[in-house]
Amino acid sequence: NGDVDDAEIDHAARIKFGTYLAMVVGTMVGGGLIMCMLEGWTLVSGFYWAFQTTTTVGYGDASFTNPISYAFGALFALFSVILVGFAMGKMASAFAEAAFEKKRRALFRKELDMDMILLMDADGSGSVDKGEFVIGVLTQLGVIEADDVTPWLQRFEELDEDGSGELDRDDLARLSAP
């Protein structure tokens, strides 16, 4: 679990971010160039139009003279807005995923001590079983909340008719018996 350090995790997140940013910029550049060819605009005008359209600003100050430009503009608007929404989500999640991975690795490397055991000790016994350990770690990582787990633990206790700490055929038979 220590094969990759935090700097490499951050680097991977920056690569993901850059890749999705390049997709957005590439789409704007491509759309701007096509519109320059269709309308005979300067590069600045074409990129200005593509940026307005992609970011949904749309000042309406660029008007078309070529009928094909209307069709291209509509398709470009639809495609570029969807792409930007997708890319923005991926760019945001790249850094969130990196932060989570660093937190997970730090927790994995952390020495187990009595404070951690007591923090995970759901039943107050002074020790933790496998279930309490896993739930405690997932709670510390923010993957779950203790309130999400409690009803399921209670349900398990209800279903565990013989109190063995396991659900098996005998428990099911007792549950289905009249």
Image: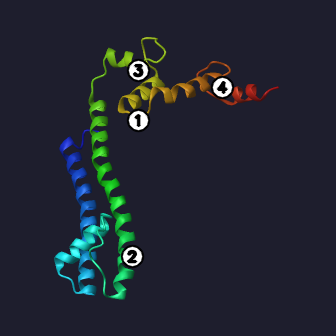
- Residue 156: horizontal and vertical position, in percent? 60, 26
**Residue 120 tag number:** 3
Q: Nearer the viewer, mark 1 or mark 3?
A: 1
Residue situated in front as seen by the camera: 117 or 21: 21
Of callouts 3 and 2, the N-terminal one: 2
Name the quadrant containing residue 61. bottom left
| Secondary structure category for the residue under label 4 | helix
Residue type beneath disc 2 = Ala
User: As shown in the figure, which amino acid type bears the numbered disc 3?
Assistant: Met
Residue marked by disc 4: 159
Residue occupying image coordinates x 32% and y 16%: 115
**Label 4 or label 2, whichever comes before in sequence order:** 2
Which mark sits nearer the N-terminus, 1 or 2? 2
Q: Is residue 20 above or below residue 167?
A: below
Spatial CA distance of label 1 from label 3 is 15 Å
Q: Is residue 174 left or right of residue 163?
A: right
Q: Categorize mark 2 by other alpha carbons within 10 Å: few (<14), some (14-19), many (20+).
A: few
Q: Separation of disc 3 and disc 4 at Cα?
A: 23 Å
- The numbered mark at residue 84 is none
Point out the frontmost of discs 3 and 2: 2
Question: Residue 166 or 136: which is nearer the viewer?
Answer: 136
Q: Describe the element under mark 3 as helix, strand or loop.
A: helix
Residue 97 percent across, percent down from the top left = 32, 45
Marks 3 and 2, Cα distance to the nearest angstrom?
Answer: 56 Å
Closer to us: mark 4 or mark 1?
A: 1
Kind of element beneath mark 1: loop
* Residue holding disc 2: 74
In space, the residues marked 1 and 2 are separated at their CA atoms by 41 Å
Q: Earlier in the sequence, mark 1 or mark 3?
A: 3
